[in-house]
Image (tube, grey):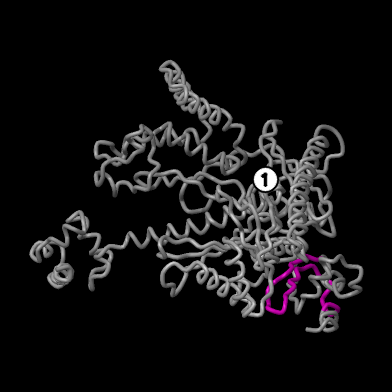
Amino acid sequence: MTFEELRQKARSLPLEPGVYLMHDAAGEVIYVGKAKKLRNRVSQYFQDTASHTPKTRMMVSRIADFDVIVAASEFEALVLECSLIKRHQPKYNILLKDDKGYPFVRIDLREPYPSMRMENRALEDGASYFGPFGARNTTQYLLDTLRLTYKLPGCGKKFPRDIGKERPCLNFQMGNCSGWCRPECTQAQYAGVMDQALRVLRGDNRELVRLLREQMNAAAEAMEFERAAQLRDRLRAIEALGQKQLVTARSVADTDAVGYFQSGSRACFAVLHYVGGNLIDKDYEIVEPSESESEAFSALVKQYYLTRRFAPKTVLLPMAMEDGALFSQLLQKELGRKVQLHVPQRGDNVRLVELAMKNAREEAQRLASREEKQLGRLCLLQDMTGLEALPRRLESYDISNIAGTDMVASMVVFKDGKPFKSGYRHFKLENMDGQDDYGAMRQVLRRRFTHYQAGDRGFAERPDALLIDGGVNHAESVRQELCGMGIDIPIFGMVKDGRHRTRALVTPDGREIGISGEQAVFSLIGQIQEETHRFAITYHKKLRSKRMKRSALDDIPGIGPKRVQTLLKHFRSVERIGAASEEELRQVLPRDAAKSVHDYFQKKREEKE
């Protein structure tokens, strides 16, 4: 639709509460909003666009159409808005990146040998959920402490399926597990130990504290000071567990204090959690600033508590939410209890909010300082290399192989001086005869920029400069390849010193740019080089390991994975299978399959002779 058509459509909307969804030309939902009166709110987007902020103007320029959903009330519109934002994750809405919340510990007591594992949410699947216990590392430390203290299994074995099948693993030998895979360990014994772990998860940690303290004292008396220190750390973690536990359906935190700060290009949303008057944890997230601080703040508060599915009794806010009363009703509906949203005016609660605001401001400013430092490094790199544009996107390439086998390449991306891991790519080299590093690098860059010219997802962004593992010849080889594709991008080879660190960059025409004298640039290029090499080596090892795991049995017609497993379990090695007679093979395989295996190895022996 044209801009004028969109304006006319907005003017025809009813003066009713509801939700509107803005779509781009591809039909994607790019913004979801709520309105008391749909006609008035939506029409504002298509009036004088000069009064809009740059972000809103950009959003309006991409609107190809919009839909509205009329609601029965403002409350219904709020519920619908929150649901649609969560479903569509629109590009132009203020969004929290981390909506996982605090993790829970899941135990399915219906299983004969229940195990503990961490989950992002408590689901209605019949299992028991405990927590949340704070950040993920806090929860993981709790699980590790319970496993090690009560010597519960931490391996991948399934019980009772794997009982008695194999001898106990290294955890048993080290005394970290009771060896529940041994037949002499009973299900009743396991249930007894698990019951002790469950008491800790339910808040009764007295027995565990006593046990850990006895073990710690015994280790200290035996002069096993390293083990005593480990036990001391576990003891402290368990003693602090009651303070670290946030909210469950049975136990809620007293108060959250919320802070928000925005300035320049960054904003921060922070939440301080209090239990019994004690500050026990902090959440914060850096977000994009908004033209309306109050709208951004309200949107973040809604997302934070609705996605985490819990809230304390009182939430202290630095400013009023436009629809705070409606949101309080929504929380009561969703959580089954009343949550008070309060903007304090005096007393201790004001100081709690001020502290939350201070935390938000400091986190935003700390990030801004880091970004300024990264920007300074990029500006220095630009000056040293003579690049026309600031190298915000750097792509680095490396080849990995052993004697020309399993040849692979890595593409690593740094954006604004930091690793951009979602942009990393692997390439498995095709049709390469022997070791040809120049040919391999040309193939990789040709494939990468063929995707770029086609506009393929993941390759559509143009880099500001390319870093190639190698010297002037590698750089010139790549330049010729890209020139043939009509692509002109600055290319630099990374020249190594005696310790395999990049000491200089070299252009395709042989101009060498020393970087070892500039520590900031030297550190940045060194980090990029190491990350590119690591990424290539990791992929090469993975392919090589996969190839080496293949056995001769995989090439025999009619012998699939299950029969391979059966053969290896019976004969213990490929060599013994190859030496077995056809009659011996028939003990574990059907007649035709046994003949196929026997004939295959017989043919191999004849070829060697």
- Left-right relation of 555 to 544: left
- Write the residue at 62% across / 51% down: 526
Q: Is residue 256 depicted above or below 445 in this figure?
A: above
Q: Which region of the structure is painted magenta? A: 10-35
- Write the residue at 78% across / 84% down: 1
| Viewer-nearest residue: 521 or 473 | 473
Instruction: Confirm whether the magenta stretch covers residue 313.
Output: no
Mark yes or no: residue 307 visible: no
Percent x, y of residue 431: 43, 75
What SS does tag 1 mark? loop
The quadrant holding residue 540 is bottom left
The quadrant holding residue 607 is bottom left
| Viewer-nearest residue: 119 or 469 | 469
- Write the residue at 82% across / 84% down: 5
Percent x, y of residue 157: 34, 47
Q: Is residue 44 depicted above or below 571 in this figure?
A: below
- Left-right relation of 192 to 400: left
Mark yes or no: residue 562 visible: yes
| Viewer-nearest residue: 323 or 554 | 554
Q: Which residue is mark 1?
A: 311
- Left-right relation of 560 to 374: left
